[in-house]
Image (tube, rainbow, N blue to C red):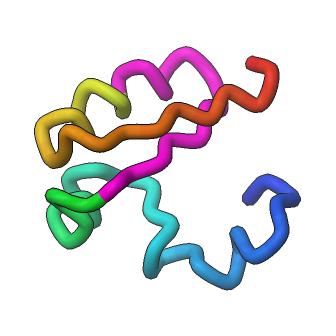
Amino acid sequence: MLPEIPAFAEHWGHSVVRCPYCHGWEVGDEPIGILTTGPASVHHTWLLRQLTDDLIYFTRGT
């Protein structure tokens, strides 16, 4: 289930992606935001760190 964030669902699969290896290469060398959903988000951060130096981590209180 997608979070209730304005425009999130509209961008799903295009500029909002789930898997850094399935979709991350398309956004490499660009700013990337990571929406924290739980402990696995830290792992995704390390994976995406291989693609860009410009990461923003959104914790949403988690």
- Displayed quadrant of residue 26: bottom left
Residue 58 lies, with reference to residue 46, above or below; the image says below
Residue 52 lies, with reference to residue 42, above or below; the image says below
Q: Is residue 11 left or right of residue 25?
A: right
**Percent position of residue 21, x then y:** 20, 53
Please tell me which residue is depicted at 35% across the width and 22% down the height of the picture: 43
- Displayed quadrant of residue 24: bottom left
**Percent position of residue 3, x then y:** 79, 53
**Percent position of residue 14, x then y:** 44, 80
Residue 49 lies, with reference to residue 6, above or below; the image says above
The verdict on residue 61 being magenta is: no
Specify the segment rendered in magenta: 31-43
- Displayed quadrant of residue 10: bottom right
Residue 44 lies, with reference to residue 14, above or below; the image says above
Please tell me which residue is depicted at 63% across the width and 22% down the height of the picture: 38
Please state the total of marks drawn on the protein image. 0
Q: Is residue 56 left or right of residue 44?
A: right
Quadrant location of the N terminus? bottom right
Query: Relative to the observer, which residue lies in front, 8 or 18?
Result: 8
Quadrant location of the C terminus? top right
Q: Is residue 1 left or right of residue 51?
A: right
